[in-house]
Image (spheres, helix red, strand yellow):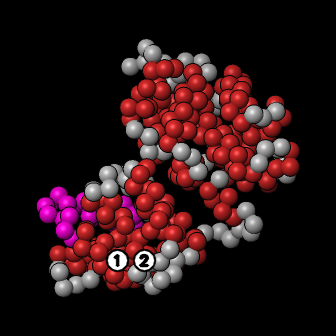
Amino acid sequence: MQNSLEFKLAKLLVAAAWADGDVQVDEINILKDLIFNLPGITGEDWQILELYMDSPIKEEETAKLLKEVITAIVTSADKLMVKNTLHALIEADGAATPEEEEFIAKVEQALEDKKTNPVAIIGSFFKKSLSFKSQDVPKREKLFQDWVKNTIYYQVHHDDKHDHFTIDDFTLRKLCLKAGLLAKVCHQDGEPSKKEITEVAARLQEIGNLSEEEATILIEAAFNRTARGLDFSHLCRSYFEITEFEERCDFLLILFRAAAASEGTCHDEIEIIREISSHLKVPHSKFIEAKLSVFPDYD
């Protein structure tokens, strides 16, 4: 909800990252990862947050965002939420260091002290932190961003199979993300069965208007990457960013149909679809609707 304290704080964090007027691509991607998975950030919130990530935020606008956050903090629960949010951000890659704990303490103090500007504190920390994280990312050349955000697409290129597809590149990228999420569901009850693989192939052919050969290439890449350990968070965010709400809702049906191909659909498959639904910012009511349409007797 765009009036929530979480959303206002997220905008302020983006503004802080822009504190020196410059944010590198790697830094923006890391910031997106951190904020995307915060509880309470809806699909509508995310679209607006992307506007703030798109270009530098001037001092006057940042001051307004800061005022919104300070005004919204009225209870001890609000203060705790701010602290927990900051913890969630800095612990995304592991436990907080003493320096990060000190950073949280400074921000909390600054938010209570109207004379102190917490943006300077947040901005200084974020620039140092994001820069450090981006330097830790392995260097890749042309397909580096795909290796990070759409590893199935990267695998298709790595296997020299990209030219086998007759569809446009945007559609292929989207289908690679779908294939990855389908493979994630099928792997929940162990090694996917032949029936599950056949079902996924049929769904990919249907939604992507693919040939049998093209669908097979996607399946092989998706199941290969899933078996090696798929970056689930990146996969969900990448799919969310290039799809509309209705398409994401419709995709839940496809995920449930893939789960139904299993010999006795397991609880873990249902739960991973629930998790995917949450990551894709689809309301729980839509998840229930899709589940009951495929599993009408499932509790």
User: With 53 as the anchor, is 159 left or right in this view?
Assistant: right
Residue lying furthest top: 297
Please identify the residue farthest to the left as the structure is shown. Answer: 75
Residue that appears at 35% across and 77% down: 61
Percent position (x, y) of residue 143?
73, 62
Amino acid under disc 1: Thr
Task: Tell whether position 95 is magenta.
Answer: no
- Name the spot of residue 145 as percent of width and height, x first: 66, 62
Residue 57: quadrant of the picture: bottom left
**Residue at horizontal 18%, vertical 85%?**
115
- The secondary structure type at the circle numbered 1 is helix
The residue at which mark 2 appears reads as: 57
In the rendered image, the quadrant that contains the C terminus is top left
Characterize the local packing of mark 1: few (<14), some (14-19) or many (20 or more) Cα atoms within 10 angstroms.
many
Q: Quadrant of residue 203?
A: top right
Q: Residue at x 63, y 40 (%)?
A: 178
Label 2, residues with CA under 10 Å away: few <14, some 14-19, many ≥20:
many
**Is residue 56 in view?**
yes
Q: Nearer the viewer, residue 272 or 277?
A: 277
What secondary structure is the magenta-colored segment mainly? helix
- Answer yes or no: is residue 96 visible: no
Point out which mark residue 62 bears: 1
Please tell me which residue lies in front, 198 or 192.
Answer: 198
Q: Are marks 2 and 1 in contact (CB under 8 Å)?
A: yes
| Residue type at the position of mark 2 | Ile
Q: Locate residue 141, reporting x and y percent.
A: 74, 69
Whether 53 is drawn above or below 277: the answer is below
Residue 255 image position (x, y, % from top left): 57, 31
Magenta residues span 70-91
The residue at 43%/60% (across/down) is 48
Q: Earlier in the sequence, mark 2 or mark 1?
A: 2
Left or right: 58, with 65 as reference point: right
